[in-house]
Structures are given as C-alpha cells and as structure tokens.
Amino acid sequence: MTTTTTRMDDPDRAPRVVVLGVGNVLMSDEGVGVHCVSALEAGYSFPPSVRCVDGGTSTQVLLDDLEDLDYLIIIDAVSAGARPGSFVRLEGDEVPHAFTTKLSPHQIGIADLLATLSFIGRAPRRVVLLGVEPERLAFDLELSPVVAGGLPELCAQVVAELERLGLAPTARAGQAGA
Amino acid sequence: MGQRITIDPITRIEGHLRIECEVDGGLVTSAWASGTMWRGVEQILLGRDPRDAWAITQRFCGVCTTVHAIASVRAVENALAMAVPRNAQYIRNLMIAAHAIHDEIVHFYHLSALDWVDVTSALKADPEAASRLGESLSNWTGNGRNELKAVKERLAGLVEGGQLGIFTNGYWGHPAMKLAPEVNLLAVAHYLQALDVQRTANKIVSILGSKTPHIQNVAVGGVSNPIALDSQSVLTMERLLAIKQAIDSVKTFVDEVYTVDVAAVAAFYPEWTALGKGITTYLAVPDFPLDERGTSFETVGGYIPAGDLAAYHPIVAFGDEYLRTNVAESVKHSWYRGGKGALHPHAGETIAEYTDFQPAGKYSWVKAPTFAGKPAQVGPLARVLMAAAAGHRPVLDHLDRLLGLIEAVGKVKVPLAGLHSTMGRHAARAVMCATNVDILARQWQLLVDNIASGDHATFEKPVFPRGEVSGFGFHEAPRGFLSHWVVIENGVIKNYQAVVPTTWNAAPRNEQDEVGPYEASLIGTPLADPERPLEVLRTIHSFDPCMACAVHLVDTTRREIVKVRAL
C-alpha cells in the first residue's frame, strides 16, 4: 500500500546511498554514467549501505532501487555546451531542473522518476548529479578519448562524495582509480 | 476551412514521436506519424560474436531490455537450428511473462490513464462515496475510505504547491473528460498502488535475471541459472517460493483492480469502442514455448487480413516459413536510401538520407514493414483477435469477463467488432495481462515439476559452423510482434536487423503509399478543441508507443508543442 514510509526516520538505520549511472552505452559518450559505475564496481569495494546501479536508459523499473534513499548520486552525460570532457556538479533542486530543461539526455525519464518518488513521499533526501560534457554520440560501444581519459577523475569525484558522507569505498588491490 | 495540427513530441511515451493531422469540420482527415529519432543501432553488431548480441540489443531501449535479449538469443539459436533445454524455456517464459505484466500495468496507469482520468477533478470527490463505489465494483482492499482520503489530501498538497509534478502535461478540464470525480479519485489511488505492483512484477524478473533493468542470465543455448534446490547462490526452492508469492500478489491486483478499471473506463467512454479502428490487418506470433524447439506454445499467433477472422492463418513454430517469407520493409517514405522496393530483413539496409519533413515524400525515421505486402497492426489487440479466431479459451475467458464487467458497469454491450478501436486496445492489453498472470503461474509449476523430475539442464553449448547461416527469432513482446534477423558468417555477425513492434504500428506510408496503423487510426477522429488534441493522444497512447529502441539524446532543445495552423 502506498503510505508514507517511516523507515527513513529510524535513527539506527545506516544511511542508504545509491550511485546511479545512466545513459546508453550504445551511443559512445552518452553511456559515460554506466561506464563510470562499471569502473567503480571493478575498482572498489563499497560499504554495505552503498549500492552501485547501472540504470541504462530505464526509468520506472528503477523505482525500487531509488526509494527512501538518504543520498542519490547520479552520473550522466550532461550537454551544457561546455568543453567536451568537462565536469559539472549539480545538487538539490538543480537536478530535476537539469533533467527538465534539457541539460541531460535523459531529461524526461529521470525527472518523472524523481517527481514520482517525491509524490509518494519516498524521494531521496539529497540528490547530486555529476555530469560530463559528451564529445561524441555516434553508435559506438567505446567512449571518445577525451571522455574516457576523464573517467578516473569522474570516479574520484564519486569517491570524494562518498568520503564526505563517511562511506568511503576501499580501492581493490591493483585497481585504484581504474 | 481545414487546419493542420502538429503534436511534437507526443508526451508520456518512450522516445520521440511527432504526429501531424489534417483537420476539417472538427474531424481528422489525414495523418502522418513521424519517428524523429534515427534508428540504425544494428550496425553496432556487425563483426561481433553472436553470443554477445543479446547483451548489446537489450541496451536498445530502457523499457524493452528483456524482450530484445530474448529475441536476440532466439534468432541466433534459430540460425544454428538449436534445441534449448526445457528449464531454460520455462525460466525465460517466467521472465517474459513477468516483464509483460509489469509493462502492461505501467502502460495503463502511468502512461495512458491520464488521457481518461482528470486528476484535478479527483479533488472534488467525496472519499466516502468513492470508497462505496470502489467496493461495489471489486474486492480490492485498497479502496477504503481512509486510503482514498489520504490520496486526495496528497493530491491537494501537490496542487496547492503550485505544480502538478508527475501530473503536468495533462489536458485537465478538457471537455472530452467524462469520469465522475469519485471515479477519478479511485483511478488516482490505483495509479499510486500500481507503482508498488509493477515493482512486485519486476522483482520476479530480477530474481531470475540476477539484475534489472539489464538481465544477466540469458545465453545463446539457454540460461545461465544453475539449478540446485538445496544450494545458496543459485536457483533454490526459497527463490522459487518468493516468485510464487509475487505471482499471487500481482494476480489480485490484475483481477480486482486493473481489469475493473479498464472496464469502468470503457463503460464511461463507450464512443471509444467505435473510434480509432485504423488498420484491421493483424499480426501476432505464438509465445511461451513449451518444448525444446518451439513447436508448441502457451499463446497462439497468426495473421488476420482485413479484419476477417475466418481468414486467420496460424503461425505455429519458431522459424515459421510463412512468417519468415512474408515480412518486408519499405523506406520509400523513410529517411533512408531506397529505390530497391520493400526488402526482406535479411537483405535490409539502413543508410540515412534525411530530407526534412515532406508529407508527400520522406517524413520519418521509422521504416514501413509489411506482411504479405500489407501494413499490419501488432500488439495485445492482435493477440486477443488471434485467440478469438483460433478459439483459444485461456484468453477468451478473460475477454468474456472483461466484456461482462463493462456491461455490468455501463449497461453497454461491446461486441467483438468493438475491439477494433482505441478502447479495444486497452481492453485487449488488460485481457493479455490477466492471461500472462495465469501463464506465469503455469510456467512456475512446469519449472518446479521439471526440476523435481531430476532434469537440471539449463544450457546447451552453441556451435558455429564455417560459412554462412541465417536465422530469425521472434517474441510476442508487450507492444507486439518483435523479430530479430541475423546473418552469421564464420561465427561472426554479418547482418542484423531488429523489426520492432512500434515499427509496425508507427510505420509511415509504405511502398504503395498506404498509411500505417497510427495514421489510419486517427482518420475520422472528432476533436473537441484542436488547440488541445486530447483525442489524438488517446488513440496514439492506446498503441503504447515505444520509439526509443536506440537513443535518448537527439534534440535537447525541443519542448512539447501543439501547433495549429489554417491550411
């Protein structure tokens, strides 16, 4: 039944965090969010309360993963007309706004998802969007060199976000920054 | 004087679609459906290992992930003339059915109900009266007064906050909206409850597929789920029981809520059983294979030309020759290089040739598929009509129940001919959803029984011959007949084409300049207010368009526009 959950108010509950990579990996840089999540999962082990999710271009099926979070970190290609490979960090209301004012390729889906979560009282407490300006959006499974080159930095930014929450992941041996 | 209406993009669908209509005397007189996204994703598969294709094709679309994975492995298995272990068929069938149920519920409640339900009118409802009405229609426990009161308050909060959030972009207060406030309130409550139910259905997919939205367990030759009833980390009895529980909980909602709501909407909008007919040539494939080679199925498929059920021609097995030889695609009105006439998918080409929107020339990125040279409608309505033509009781029993409910609520009798309509597509989707719940339960039992008999096989290793082989895989996906066509040379992919359900329905004019199903379905539709063409959305949404099938980023500057101009 759809009633407002009280789970979030449980003081003993560990903070719940999701790192959500979105995008289409068939479209080169469009899939940078998914590539980032794969690199993070390969390079680090995460505390139990942090989950990495490869969201692809899905929306509604992600509801289950995203409700009642304390912190949602979305990673995506963000077209803001900046230099390809440059980073952008948006927070709070800027995030759904970015998805509705077309800064991100996934505007409709993610904005609707956040609006739905908010309507049923299960929205994440905080939302951060870490974006990368894409260079190439052609059919290709590989990232462009400039965006691929920025992947370690993007991963480091996610790690830094988690460190600030006291939930730093541990680098796997020989894989740090991968 | 005539008018030209352009709706671009159509909202609450997956992907980008533009509809243009000519309107004269308040009626749509002609229409053009234009897919505004380039679709040439198949080229990414050329030169790759056919065993990897399913993992790539499930990235075509964020909604239809599972269906492209299934069609892809079936295509490669067909090319290799492989048998697939029964357990693998059952496990795939469970995922297919659960995904379909999820998709059908999401489509009705979250993508199309708002064409019929006026959310703002729900604010005028008396929760007490709404609860009495709900309880008179079904045994659902979620129609209680307190529940409905809470929903109304939540909705009021949203409206007072000055933004409708998920309910923006609706034509609220439109003269074609007819439900009473209490019915609207019930519908909004069910909209919210459906969010939970679709998750339960999806949970079945994730238990079996390891992950969603992108399943991990499919393989050419079977599935990668090892079966051991007494072991952790594999498919255990505990996981199978969790699936059974999910099936039961979804069944209650589908029988007591979804089916009843569709009947109520149909009863309040009986005129929509006579509108939106369009192309009455139908195509569907059988699905849920019950044996290793796909010669016996849970559902029936076939071809019905020009609405004539007596002329039904069945499609009976994987690799069906009648199906294989009759599919072709035209690009005469699509933004691809043509000149060769309609081509069979194994010879299909996808070379872009963009010309701008030319109503008499090329105007869409969607190709125009034909069956035996004719455009065909695919989807749940096609499935239900195949069942009617074949006398397939498991589907017809649910159809009879739904038609009985419409009659009970609205005192209107909808004949079988009334299914050739906008409302018929919604009714058929609900009927297929209820059927899919039954199939889910049966497939679960078949899997459990087969494992208990000692058969634990889930995978057969594929062997690729030297030289060239070709094949096709079909799947009756939620939106209709999906086919993947593959040519393999020396173990690598030489050609790959996906002919997706929405390509059939959203097709532009074909080689003979015949309109496609969306286009045909709009002709004759009355519009109460051309500035707010709700009626066009009702019919287009009834097909459940999924245009994504490739990309999400094309033109990020576009906003929803309805342009109306005099001709």
Image (cartoon, rainbow, N blue to C red):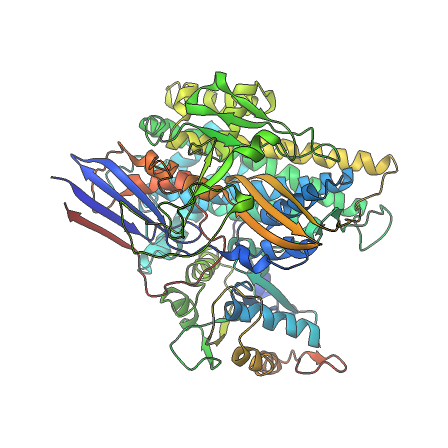
Residue B528, percent from left and from top = 21, 38
Seen from the viewer's position, the closer of residues A6 and B429 is B429
Residue B561 placement, left or right of A90: left
Q: Residue at x 55, y 27 (%)?
A: B302
In the current view of this chain or complex, which residue is farthest to the left? Answer: B1
For the point 28% across and 49% down, the residue is: B7
Residue at 42 percent across and 49 percent down: it is: B13
Q: Is residue B222 left or right of residue B545?
A: right
In the shown orientation, is residue A113 left or right of residue B514?
right
Question: In front: B513, or B295?
Answer: B513
Quarter of the picture holding the C terminus of chain B:
top left
Q: Is residue B48 above or below residue B258?
A: below
The answer to whether one can see residue B179 in this image is: no
* Residue B545 in the image: above or below residue A59: above
Q: Position of residue B516 (x, y in %)?
A: 37, 37
Q: Does residue B87 appear in this view?
A: yes
* Residue B166, above or below B545: below
Could you say which quadrant of the image residue B80 lies in?
A: top right
- Left or right: where does residue B400 sit relative to residue B414? right
Residue closest to the far top: B310
Asked whether B550 or B252 is in front, the reply is: B550
Give the number of marks: 0
The x and y percentages for residue B35 are: 38, 50
Q: Quadrant of the N terminus of chain B?
A: top left
Residue B52 locus on image (x, y percent): 67, 57
